[in-house]
Amino acid sequence: MTAVLREKSYFDQRATQEMREHLHPVQRTLQEDLAYACRILAATGQEAGLAGQISARSDTPGAYWTLRFGLGFDEATPNDFIEVGADLETLSGQGMANPATRFHLWIYKSRPDVNAIIHTHSPWVSALVAARQPLVVAQMDMTPFHNDCAFLADWPGVPIADQEGVLISEALGGKRSIILAHHGYLTTGGTMAEATYLSVYLERAARMQTRARVYGELTPVPDHLAQEAHDYLLKPSIVKGTFDYWCRQIDRSAA
C-alpha cells in the first residue's frame, strides 16, 4: 500500500483546529496578567533593578496601566498597577509611573494594534546590544522574530522625554519587537501574553546567538522556512497556552 504524502497545510490546519478544541485558555483580569508577566520576567532572569518597564493599554483613551515605580518585577501583585494619562499623571491607584515609560505613549499612539509593551535590560540582550549587534534568525526558536524585530543602532539616551518616544516608535515601525543598541529590547503584543512570550523568546534568542558566535558566523534560516515557522509559533493558541504554562510555574514556585 502506497502512503499518500499530504501537504503541510493539511497538518497545520488540523493542529490549529485541535488546539482550539483541547487548549483551554485561562481568563484573568488585565492586572492579573500584568502581575504574572512581571513574575515570569523575574523568573527568567530579566530583572534589572528598576530599569525594566511593563505596560498595557487602558480602556481610557490615551492612558495605560503600568507597575508603580519603586517595585521590582519579582514583587509585583495585581494591586501594584496604576493607570496613567498622557502626561504620566496617575489616574487610578497610588504612586507614580516610571518616568522612562513616556516612550510607551508614542508606541500606543502610532500602533493601534499594540495593547501591551515590555522593555527590559536583560542579560543576554544586553550583551548583544553592547556589541551593537542585530538579531540573526538562525534557529527555529528564533523565528518569531523573522522580519519582525527592528534594530535601532543609535542610542538616544535615557528615554524620559518625547524625542526618544518619536525615535523608538519610528524605528519599531510595524514590527512587534525591537533591539535597542547600547540599551536593551522592547516587545509588543496585541495581548499581555504575546508581549511576554516574545520577551522570553527574545532573551533566549540573544543567548543562543551569543553562544553560537563561538563556532563562527551564524547561518540564517532560509526566508520561506523562517516565515512559515514565524506564523506557526505566533498562533494565538500557542502563545496563550505557553503563557498559561508559565503562570502555572509561577504558582508552583510560590506554593
Image (cartoon, grey):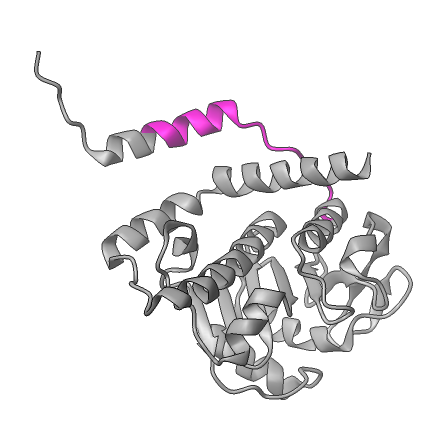
Q: Position of residue 232 (x, y in %)?
A: 38, 44
The answer, for residue 173, to whether it is visible in the render is no
Where 72 falls versus 26 (above or below)?
Answer: below
Q: Is residue 164 left or right of residue 84?
A: left
Residue at coordinates 80% horizontally, 70% vertically from top-left? 97
What span is colored magenta in the figure? 14-30
Q: Position of residue 106 (x, y in %)?
A: 60, 75
Q: Position of residue 197 (x, y in %)?
A: 56, 50
Outermost residue, top side = 1
Residue 15, magenta (yes or no) = yes
Q: Position of residue 148 (x, y in %)?
A: 41, 63
Outermost residue, front side = 214
Residue at coordinates 60% horizontally, 48% vertically from top-left? 193
Residue 223, magenta (yes or no) = no
Residue at coordinates 55% horizontally, 68% vertically from top-left? 125
Quarter of the image with the C terminus in it: top right
Where 134 falls versus 57 (above or below)?
Answer: below
Q: Is residue 232 left or right of residue 73?
A: left
Q: From the viewer's side, name the closer residue of 187 and 29.
A: 187
Outermost residue, left side = 2
Residue at coordinates 42% horizontally, 68% vertically from top-left? 135
Quarter of the image with the N terminus in it: top left
The answer, for residue 207, to whether it is visible in the render is yes
Q: From the viewer's side, name the closer residue of 92 and 60.
A: 92
Q: Quadrant of residue 185?
A: bottom right
Where 115 falls versus 153 (above or below)?
Answer: above
Q: Quadrant of residue 4?
A: top left
